[in-house]
Amino acid sequence: PTMTSAAPGASSPAEDGSAPAISQTKEGTQIADAAEERMLTRLSEVRGDLDRRGVFNLGIGVVLTLLALGILMELVRNAPRSIASTSEAISYFLPRLAVAAALQGFAYFFLSLYRRSIDEIKFFQNEQTRVELKLLALRVLLHTEATEGALAPILLAMAKTERSRSERAKGGDAYPLA
């Protein structure tokens, strides 16, 4: 990459034969690379944690659903052939149906937790994509002379990319980098 101007307060490479602007750019790039790696690693770790939690919740929900289904099947299979009164039918069926209904309620709770974790995973995937786009725009800007050229509007649009519904609803960037 070519440098058109040196850092403020530094002499230009043409004046003293050294290249302070290039070394500063390399150091800045290394710092940006390290920050980018940390940021993307954190986002990936959060997504991984959410994924593990979601699979756990899905497993519990499926097991509870199967258990409730087994109870209902046993209820039908082992039902008495004749029931003499309504109170006898209620005393036989009500406790078994209540247990099955309670298990289904717990299963629904865990399955809804799974669904919410999937939504959170999608959010963090969108956040990671948004951060990557902003960093890409920053890198292109730093490594080209696009500040006043035709690339500047494109880079600005990339930097303002909004990925989540809440950001689009607000009409702005909820998490600016600067």
Image: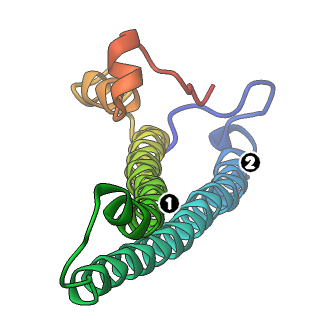
Question: For the point 31% across and 64% down, which residue is it?
Answer: 89
Q: Outermost residue toward the front?
A: 84
Q: Can residue 17 be seen in the rendering of this structure?
A: no
Question: For the point 26% across and 83% down, which residue is it?
Answer: 80
Q: For marks 1 and 2, give the one nearer the viewer.
A: 1
> Relative to residue 23, is residue 177 drawn left or right?
left
> Relative to residue 166, is residue 23 drawn left or right?
right
Question: For the point 47% across and 55% down, which residue is it?
Answer: 117
Which quarter of the image is occupied by the C terminus?
Answer: top right
Q: Which residue is mark 2?
A: 20
Mark 1 lies on a secondary structure that is: helix
Residue 40 lies in quadrant: bottom right
Mark 2 lies on a secondary structure that is: helix
Q: Is residue 144 above or below residue 7?
A: below
Q: Which residue is mark 1?
A: 106
In percent of width and height, residue 28 lies at 69, 49
